[in-house]
Amino acid sequence: MSLIDHDRADGADRTPDLLLAERDSLRRFVTGLMGRDPHGAEDVVQETLLRAWQSAGRLDWRDRPIRMWLFRVARNLVVDSRRRDRTVPVGITAADFGPVGPPPVPDHAEQVGDRRVLVSALRTLAPAHREVVARVHLLGQSGEDVARQLGLPQGTVKSRTHHGMRALRASLESQGPRTAGAGNHRGETVRGETR
């Protein structure tokens, strides 16, 4: 065995003692970096000591203090841990996770009131207009389907829908401000029909 091999063997025998001597100061250093995460700090300390043990043959234990090497490895492990914890998968934003608060609760009393106003306004329409408006706008049927079901030309269905919606809008506006703002009455298109 050469002199160099003898020194390395001697250093390898001292490795556990040197590492155990630095354990408490390393734990204090890591705890200072990580804050109130004692379990995470212990994990970093153990990983640092494990890496030192695995690298014992390559480290210069006699000429350089091992403490600086341990502190640098521990600091790098803490930085890597923080980076890993704050990563967000690509393509996902905070908006993809939905609203933060509880979902809004619908006001059933307001819905009941709106239905009553709508039903009373629908009763003011001529029966032919009421039938077409109800099928197109309340049941969501297409004008083509309504024409086929009622045996009417499509142009007649479009005309009755247009005039029925106009009369319905006038009836709702005459009932007051609560109902005037409740619907779509500015010439916007709904289901292909002008309102």
Image: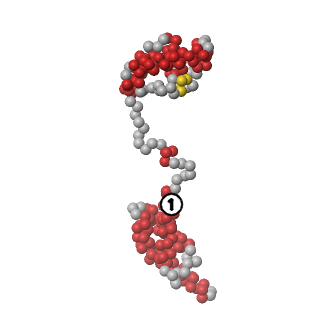
Residue in front for this viewpoint, 60 or 173: 173
Q: Does residue 149 appear anywhere in the picture?
A: no
Instruction: Name the residue at the bottom extreme.
Output: 3
Residue type of the residue flagged with mark 1: Arg
Q: Does residue 83 appear anywhere in the picture?
A: yes
Does 68 sit left or right of 149 as displayed?
left
Does 35 sit left or right of 76 as displayed?
left
Give the residue drawn at x 43%, y 66%. Answer: 33
Residue 107 is situated, as x and y percent measured from the top left of the image, at: 38, 30
Residue in front for this viewpoint, 64 or 143: 143
Give the residue drawn at x 54%, y 15%. Answer: 160
Give the residue drawn at x 60%, y 86%. Answer: 4
Residue 173 is situated, as x and y percent measured from the top left of the image, at: 41, 21
Residue 182 is situated, as x and y percent measured from the top left of the image, at: 42, 26
Residue in front for this viewpoint, 75 or 121: 121
Residue 181: quadrant of the picture:
top left
> Measured along the vertical axis of the image, is residue 167 above or below residue 110?
above
Q: Which residue is mark 1?
A: 83
Q: Secondary structure at mark 1?
A: helix
Residue 104: quadrant of the picture:
top left
